[in-house]
Image: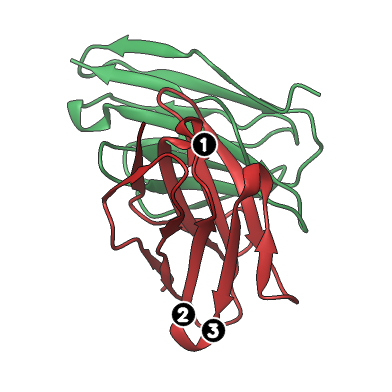
Amino acid sequence: AQSVTQPDIHITVSEGASLELRCNYSYGATPYLFWYVQSPGQGLQLLLKYFSGDTLVQGIKGFEAEFKRSQSSFNLRKPSVHWSDAAEYFCAVGAGAGKSTFGDGTTLTVKP
Amino acid sequence: NAGVTQTPKFQVLKTGQSMTLQCAQDMNHEYMSWYRQDPGMGLRLIHYSVGAGITDQGEVPNGYNVSRSTTEDFPLRLLSAAPSQTSVYFCASRSSTDTQYFGPGTRLTVL
């Protein structure tokens, strides 16, 4: 069975600092991997996705993620965080047919 | 395109009542899913559908029914609401080669 682990429940960074959110997955084949962001009271918005090919993927809002098969990781990064990035971030692995398994999320707080 | 729409946005039920959460998408996507989100947890899959007339159970299906009579609609039925079903419910659609698109959610409270 597939699973996703986000080791950090809560991360606080200063505005302008760099950010890395960790994601580890377990899946038997080449995974489809996703990062979503959720603002309070809102639905989930896709930041980026990895299906195949280049292991460094670029997303919206200046985010990027790197797929590392050897480490079963798909960490999300941003070089300079803005106050508007404060939200909850979810990593997910997809098994097709609309079935995705989500991590428990990481809440990002941005200090001024 | 409206994308994925869900109604209602908020609902309060008493234990034992039944209700249907509506979900519709206008992207002609084959796949649709229902998730629930509880505090401190990610989304858990309730039921999903790979096309009209085809549904299957996800991780937490007990107490919920679904049907898929059209490509556009995928309603979720609570047969006899329980306090444990208090949650935020998200519907999502996905094409065969694309990513999931989520609705805005329905916040359900069962007293």
Residue at (42, 35) in percent of width and height: A86
Looking at this view, is B89 or B83 the one in front? B89
Mark pair 2, 3: CA separation: 5 Å
Check disc 3 and give the amino acid type.
Answer: Arg
Q: Is residue B106 left or right of residue B99?
A: left
Mark pair 1, 2: CA separation: 34 Å
Color used for chain A?
Answer: red
Color used for chain B?
Answer: green
Q: Is residue B4 left or right of residue B58?
A: right
Residue that badge 3 annotates: A69
Residue that badge 2 annotates: A72
Q: Are marks 1 and 3 on the same chain?
A: no
Q: Quadrant of the C terminus of chain A?
A: top left
Mark pair 1, 3: CA separation: 36 Å
Q: Crowdedness of circle 2 by 10 Å Cα count: few (<14), some, many (20+)?
A: some
Q: Crowdedness of circle 3 by 10 Å Cα count: few (<14), some, many (20+)?
A: few
Residue that badge 1 annotates: B66
Residue at (39, 68) in percent of width and height: A3
Say which of marks 1 and 2 sits in front: 2
Q: Residue B72: in sight, yes or no? A: yes
Check disc 2 and give the amino acid type.
Answer: Ser
Residue at the far bottom: name it. Answer: A70
Task: Identify the chain of the residue marked 1, using the numbered disc in the image.
Answer: B
Q: Looking at the image, is B26 positioned above or below residue A9? A: above
Q: Evaluate if marks 2 and 3 touch, with contact meaning CB atoms under 8 Å apart.
A: yes
Check disc 1 and give the amino acid type.
Answer: Val
Residue at (67, 45) in percent of width and height: A60
